[in-house]
Amino acid sequence: MIIDVHAHWGPWFFTMDVAEVNHAVMDRYGIDLAVVSATEAVIYDAPSGNRALASVLEGTDRLYGYVTVNPRRLADAERDLREYLPTGRFVGAKIHTDYTRSPVTSPQMREALAMLAELDCPALVHTWDASVLDLAQACLDLPGLRAIAGHMGATGWRHAIEAARACDRLYLEPCWSHAPAGRFAEVAAAVDARQLLFGTDATLIDPASAFGAVAAARLTGETAERVAWRNAADLFGLKIPPGHGSPPAPPER
Amino acid sequence: MTAFDAEGLIGDLTVTLDVDVLVGAYPDRDGPPGAPAEVCETLARHRITAGAVAGLRAALFDVRSGNDEILALDRPELLPVGAVDLRDPVGAGGELERLAGSGARAVRLFPDEQGVEADFPSVRHVARRATDLGLAILTGGDVRRFWRPFAGLGARVVFLDTHFYHLGDFLVTAADEPGFHTSTRLLNSPDALETTAAHVGAERLLYGSRTPHYEPVVPLLRLATSGLTPDEVAGVAGGNARRLLGLEAQS
């Protein structure tokens, strides 16, 4: 059982044709469920992309949705969140700090995160290098906020370790197109297993990158299960599939 | 077994030549020391039976002693690849002649590590000299810029840093340059291998891992789960590299 907490649905502007391959790509790696954001919503028009994704989610039980939030369009975001979250098909919010030029420390981003904390809506936030520390600080400043550091800082995975250790409501997922040796193993050894998630960035990045990085870490037992799906199911309130329901013991900290 | 069973997905795929292997360490990084024994152990653990190996001592500090270390490696699984310093194009010319005379089949360029840009005269000079000497060229650098100094020479080149973001730029240059090839290390979008095969042929794809500084399992997984034919997979996994480096008669 694997749940991918960082995936996308829709086309990309690079030399690639991946708009319709979500299920096929998931099947390559045994990924059962994925939480996706619409690429249109992330890159260009959040309301239009969210609306298109809502339609797609009606036709599959393997994808859940993120409501994409543009921090510069908070009225649109609040309307979409209040419309789509109650459907149960959308389980979180996605914010890409680069495409909206809204760093975690920007006023509009702080306002967006405050709104998500108020709604008790988990937020997947793009992080790179030291910005993951800013996201941890936002979690500390906003007591209700639960945030996933997308890419766990990419080049800044050591910052991600520091960030996750500062706040237990900050979660890390590893997707990145690069796979420096030992990156995920180092993070998994230093961070509470309850804060680790699996994300791929599919269908932009093939799951090979994150799957391989996690496989190389040679996780065992409960930690592997937590990364693969249990933490995601808990965070998003997803139904635990039959056969995967035994409650885990608390991990050693 | 956990859900992350990479071995199960990779199956019996064996890489017969990895074009991107290093020995030595980066002094500005916390990565592995890159001792030859450690590198060979990592390759073997991933069913990679041979690697084209260059040395970071040559790339970062002293070309001659660094290349001598590589040429002296007595490990059949490591195919020595020389390096030159693009910051010294005059010395690079002499070192290329020495490498060719010592039987090296390829030279590796480290423009990023050496702070050299694609339009520096040094790169074009080394590209021309290496090609004239019959050496294949394994080069780092952004393919969107580094295609140019190798164009129009009949050069045999492997771009080691081609990212799938830039795949289109590689494809349009490779269409005009039959000697242009790419490592698969960063071609990890869902369809980059298949797109390359469709546009310029799978023979332009060479498995590259950058062991021990990157996870070799990532390009292995992508290749093993690709839509390429079994013959194409075998080519990418080493056949293409062996042909490019003139090793077919020995394999």
Image (tube, coloured by chain):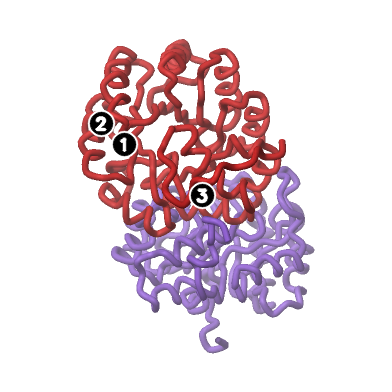
Q: What's the chain of the residue with tag 1?
A: A
Q: Residue at x 41, y 14 (%)?
A: A115
Q: Is residue A75 left or right of residue A211?
A: left
For badge 2, the amino acid type reads: Gly
Q: How crowded is mark 1: few (under 14 residues within 10 Å), some or many (20 or more)?
A: many
Q: Name the residue under label 2.
A: A49
Q: Residue at x 53, y 62 (%)?
A: B6
Tell me the distance, in whole angstroms, between the alpha carbons under discs 3 and 2: 25 Å
Residue neighbourhood size for the residue with mark 2, other residues' Cα within 10 Å, grouped as few (<14), some (14–19), many (≥20) = many
Query: In terms of secondary structure, where does tag 2 sit?
Result: helix
Q: Give the quarter of the figure containing the N terminus of chain B.
A: bottom right
A39 lies left or right of B136: left
The chain to which mark 3 is attached is A
- Secondary structure of the residue carrying tag 3 is helix
Q: Is residue A86 above or below residue B172?
A: above
Q: Distance between the residues labelled 2 and 1?
A: 7 Å
Residue receiving disc 1 = A39
Q: Relative to B244, is A137 above or below? A: above
Q: Which of A113 and B112 is in front in this view?
A: A113
Which colour represents chain B? purple
Give the mark nearest the N terminus, 3 or 1: 1
Residue at mark 3 = A210
